[in-house]
Image: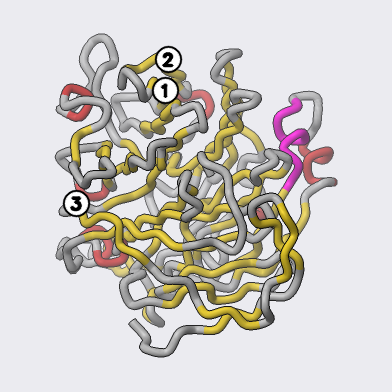
Amino acid sequence: MSKVPALLSVIGLLMVGGSAVCLAAETTQPALEVVAQLDQRPANLAVTSDGDIIVSLHPFDNPSTQLLMIKSDGTQDPFPSKEWNSGQPDLNGLGFVNVIGVRCTPSDEVIALDIGDKDHAPRMVFFNLGVQQATREVYIPRDFTTDQSFLQDFAYDWEKDRAYIADMGQADLSAPAHPALIDVAPSAGWVRRVLPDFEEFMPPEKPLEIGGKVLRIEKDGKEIPVRAALNSITIDPQMDWLYFAPMGEGKLYRVPISRVSDMTYSKDDILKRLEVVSDKKPASDGITVDSAGNVYVAAIGKGEIGVITPDGEYKTYIKDDRLDWVDGFSFGPDGYLYATVSQLDRAPFFNKGEDKSQKPFLIVRFKPLADGVMGR
């Protein structure tokens, strides 16, 4: 890590703790704290109202556990039970297949996005944290996915019980992408595919670069540069706007949730309210938004966490050698923003079968510029 703190120039009023304060023109980067070390690669995470952490372990590695709960005393146990993490689902559906996305609401309802496989349809599984039991499941029928579907992250509006899943549409990174937004209404029991193959969802022409080196996969003896489509997705604390962006360099967009969730609006109606928030120069995985409209960006190619301020300017917020592919974000009840560090670029999938990861994997936290909301 750099011995000299990076400086972040921030101008404007931010809402912190419910009152308006003016940030100094120059603020030293916040301390980056390691809160957990893992033997297996993390993907996304959720922080409960008690400060416990629920983290998904990346399916790229065929992990022995799909979801892990890290208690405040440091103990780590499969969530919600060993049975759910013991292998393929039983006849009653008990058992995960491939979990990536995970969220926790302020009322401690835990939602896991199990993307399934060729034999199991994707589904969202809802758990009551108090009793650690599944309360409902919502399957995503094959009618709303494609052979290229890769459902890797989602945003959840608990006030309306509505989920918005980013289908990256690149299960095979060497084939044409078919991204889309999948709108799920669990209470109503229906699903729909929104804006399929939308231009702004597609992978940018420039391939992903990690530390200045193009990320590649190998297929049929050929090395193929990775160009990454729709991935980053979140909802603002007021649950008014849906933010999204491709994983590759491109732009950050937002659209009113009311336009996406109302089935009477056509594609043209949705696009009329689509806004460009900013150019997003770094490639990114997870994003989240605080109460002041700052968008935190997991800048996977730069070993940093960035911020897109309300005026649309990207700035480095934390630069640290340990931030090798920050993946997911989650605000905690303690005022911190938590993040997983997956080292995904070092996984065997991107390195001709060789695991170049340097264990342990990390979960970190830091102070954001303004308060956030749990579940984001």
Residue under label 2: 136
Q: Is residue 169 above or below residue 299?
A: above
User: What are the residue bounds of the magenta stretch?
Assistant: 255-262
- For the residues marked 2 and 3, what is the alpha-carbon distance in whole angstroms? 28 Å
In the image, residue 256 lies in the stretch drawn in magenta: yes
User: In this view of the protein, can residue 209 be seen by the observer?
Assistant: no
Q: Kindly check if marks 1 and 2 are in contact, taking CB atoms under 8 A apart as contact.
A: yes
Residue nearer the viewer, 249 or 202: 249
The residue depicted at 47 percent of the width and 35 percent of the height is 146
Instruction: Look at the magenta stretch and give its main secondary structure.
Output: helix
Q: Amino acid at mark 3?
A: Gln
User: In this view of the protein, can residue 29 be seen by the observer?
Assistant: yes
The residue depicted at 23 percent of the width and 10 percent of the height is 91
The residue depicted at 40 percent of the width and 59 percent of the height is 365
- For the residues marked 1 and 3, what is the alpha-carbon distance in whole angstroms? 24 Å
Q: Amino acid at mark 1?
A: Phe
Report x, y in % for residue 356. Answer: 18, 68
Secondary structure state at the residue bearing disc 1: strand
Secondary structure state at the residue bearing disc 3: loop
Q: Residues within 10 Å of mark 2 (few under 14, many from 20)?
A: few
Residue under label 1: 126
Residue under label 3: 40
As drawn, is 293 to the left or to the right of 188? right
Report x, y in % for residue 66. Answer: 25, 37
Q: Residues within 10 Å of mark 1 (few under 14, many from 20)?
A: many
The residue depicted at 33 percent of the width and 31 percent of the height is 116
